[in-house]
């Protein structure tokens, strides 16, 4: 396809040498009327006049190839230059301009492609100066001019060359824009004619009743063939000539048939999405929302998705509405069937995971999980998910399952009274599942706890307790929403899952209260300094480096800590209690603030 477009683009280029006669650009229309005393124009004036005439010719030329040829043929108007080669970017490829049968030197051609859209020097034998200059529009690169000079150009000559290149690029931008407008207009005209012809044929072949029967029969065939959402949008597009699409309950695209598909598809706004669904649900039949004709897919009253036609010109008629209604009915049956399968699968997986969490026979567990395509021989993590605004029902469990699949987690899940449990065969990403669920639910008020890895089925019940403990630690911390890994809890793995939160605060205040108050009053960081000191194992150099302070400054701070708190860091008991207090202060109480 690139070759055919290139041939048509350059069809007249090789026969168009000298479209602007050399030397004619500098003639002034009133030159003949000047008296003998009129001073002769300077070389700079002459060059500017030639460039002015050339600029007008460039913008009056509609063809991109002719514009490039014109600029190359008259490059000497800007100085002691020669045009060695010219390129146009066609369908993403740099295509050289054919000129007098010459073939560009492979080194020049390779150099131009290596520049990858940037300007740069080129080497041509016998020429002391050479540059490849990009012809850039506002949004894209249109091509290149490869220019050499028999002498090193002066600043003025470089400025004139820059002006010529910019005018050539601007003329190419105008020509490309006109070409796109013509192509878009032709395509739109073709599509309209095609749609008109299709509707005319349909109306002429069958009467009103026949059309209704054809629509019903086509949708019945789609439903009977279990073709799914794509088969339904294809059939609807064939019937109406309009782009047809299916979105899920949350506004994410599931299928699109027809032209003008947005890429990327816009991310839905949860609040506006709910408002739109409620507005459409109050009406009977399809509803127009901006440029779309929308029909809800809701078997038994529950909204499972949206079927829509893109009708920007408001051309939908009674036949279009009829087709959309029948398609929505067929899609409702398909989605209801898929929903039932998902619920059955969820119950089956839930029973298997329940057995794992309670403790089960290894041999039977391996066999049963293998039957559903899950390998229990790998290391596993138990993940507990709780969202403050969602009850742990089947709907939320399916939401968690979709989010886990979307981020690449291979897992099985079950649900408890207030949380959902996943058994995953790989360590979850620190934030991916939380962010995916925040998008699915429309709120970030959720907490996730992740256990340490389990290499044995007998460890799964204990790992479940670890995941719950990690979740409880997060829920009782200052930053209560997000993901917490059990193996990153450090000291708090020993202290328990947060039931003694008030006692922990008392303990921290007893050992660090004076330092915390001092930091608050004087805007210092004594507690953080002490915490870093313990984290670095009492190493002065590592502590000073982590705090980005001098060693002498650290020594001064530690002495101030001894004086303010009244505790001796050399005392084993004081040191242990202070270290425990700083870890609880950081992990449970959220650190500074």
Image (tube, helix red, strand yellow):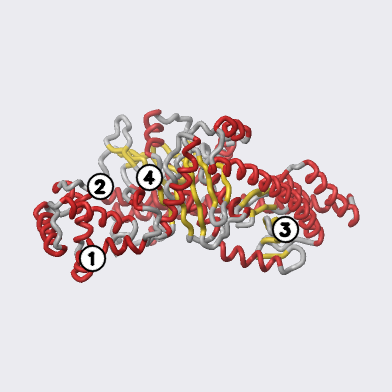
Q: Circle 1 sits in a helix, a strand or a loop, which is it? A: helix
* Residue 481 place in picture, x, y as percent: 44, 58
Assign the N terminus to one quadrant of the image: top right
First in residue order: circle 1 vs circle 3: 3
Q: CA distance from mark 3 to mark 2?
A: 74 Å
Q: CA distance from mark 1 to mark 4?
A: 28 Å
**Mark in front: 2 vs 4:** 4
Pointer 1 with pointer 4, Cβ within 8 A: no
- Residue labelled with disc 3: 298
Q: Circle 2 sits in a helix, a strand or a loop, which is it? A: loop
* Residue 67 place in picture, x, y as percent: 48, 46
Return the mark for residue 154: 2
- Residue labelled with disc 4: 487
Specify whether residue 308 is in view: yes
Pointer 1 with pointer 3, Cβ within 8 A: no
**Mark in front: 2 vs 1:** 1
């Amino acid at each position: 396809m690139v070759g055919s477009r290139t041939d048509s683009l350059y069809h007249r280029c090789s026969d168009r040498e000298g479209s602007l006669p050399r030397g004619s650009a500098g003639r002034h229309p009133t030159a003949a009327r000047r008296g003998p005393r009129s001073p002769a124009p300077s070389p700079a004036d002459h060059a500017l006049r030639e460039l002015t005439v050339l600029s007008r010719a460039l913008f009056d030329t509609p063809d991109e190839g002719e514009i490039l040829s014109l600029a190359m043929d008259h490059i000497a108007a800007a100085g002691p230059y020669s045009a060695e080669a010219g390129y146009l970017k066609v369908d993403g490829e740099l295509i050289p301009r054919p000129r007098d049968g010459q073939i560009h030197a492979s080194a020049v051609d390779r150099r131009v492609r290596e520049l990858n859209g940037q300007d740069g020097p080129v080497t041509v034998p016998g020429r002391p100066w050479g540059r490849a200059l990009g012809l850039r529009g506002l949004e894209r690169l249109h091509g290149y001019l490869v220019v050499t000079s028999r002498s090193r150009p002066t600043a003025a000559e470089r400025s004139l060359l820059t002006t010529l290149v910019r005018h050539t690029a601007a003329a190419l931008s105008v020509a490309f824009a006109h070409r796109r407008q013509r192509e878009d207009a032709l395509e739109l005209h073709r599509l309209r004619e095609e749609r008109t012809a299709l509707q005319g044929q349909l109306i002429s072949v069958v009467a009103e009743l026949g059309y209704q029967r054809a629509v019903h029969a086509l949708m019945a065939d789609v439903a009977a063939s279990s073709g799914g959402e794509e088969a339904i949008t294809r059939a609807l597009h064939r019937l109406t000539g309009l782009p047809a699409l299916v979105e899920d309950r949350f506004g994410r695209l599931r299928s699109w048939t027809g032209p003008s598909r947005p890429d990327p598809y816009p991310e839905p706004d949860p609040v506006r999405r709910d408002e739109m669904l409620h507005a459409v649900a109050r009406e009977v039949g399809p509803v127009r929302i901006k440029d779309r004709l929308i029909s809800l897919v809701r078997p038994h009253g529950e909204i499972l998705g949206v079927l829509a036609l893109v009708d920007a010109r408001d051309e939908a008629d009674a036949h279009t509405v009829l087709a959309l209604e029948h398609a929505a009915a067929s899609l409702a049956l398909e989605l209801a069937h898929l929903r039932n399968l998902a619920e059955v699968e969820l119950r089956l997986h839930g029973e298997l995971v329940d057995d794992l969490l309670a403790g089960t026979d290894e041999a039977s567990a391996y066999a049963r999980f293998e039957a559903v395509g899950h390998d229990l021989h790998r290391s596993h993590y138990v993940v507990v998910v709780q969202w403050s605004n969602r009850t742990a029902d089947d709907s939320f469990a399916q939401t968690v399952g979709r989010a886990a699949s979307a981020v690449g987690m291979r897992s099985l899940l079950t649900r408890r009274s207030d949380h959902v449990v996943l058994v995953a065969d790989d360590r979850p990403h620190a934030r991916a599942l939380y962010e995916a669920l925040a998008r699915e639910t429309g709120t970030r008020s959720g907490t996730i706890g992740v256990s340490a890895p389990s290499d044995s089925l007998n460890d799964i019940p204990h790992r479940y307790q670890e995941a719950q403990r990690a979740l409880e630690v997060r829920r009782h911390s200052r930053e209560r929403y997000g993901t917490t890994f059990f193996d990153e809890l450090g000291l708090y793995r020993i202290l328990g899952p947060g039931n003694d939160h008030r006692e922990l605060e008392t303990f921290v205040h007893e050992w660090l209260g004076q330092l915390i108050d001092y930091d608050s009053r004087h805007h210092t960081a004594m507690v953080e300094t002490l915490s870093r000191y313990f984290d670095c194992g009492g190493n002065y150099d590592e502590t000073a480096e982590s705090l980005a302070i001098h060693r002498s400054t650290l020594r001064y701070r530690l002495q101030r800590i001894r004086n303010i708190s009244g505790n001796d860091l050399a005392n084993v008991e004081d040191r242990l209690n202070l270290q425990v207090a700083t870890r609880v202060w950081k992990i449970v109480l959220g650190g500074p603030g």
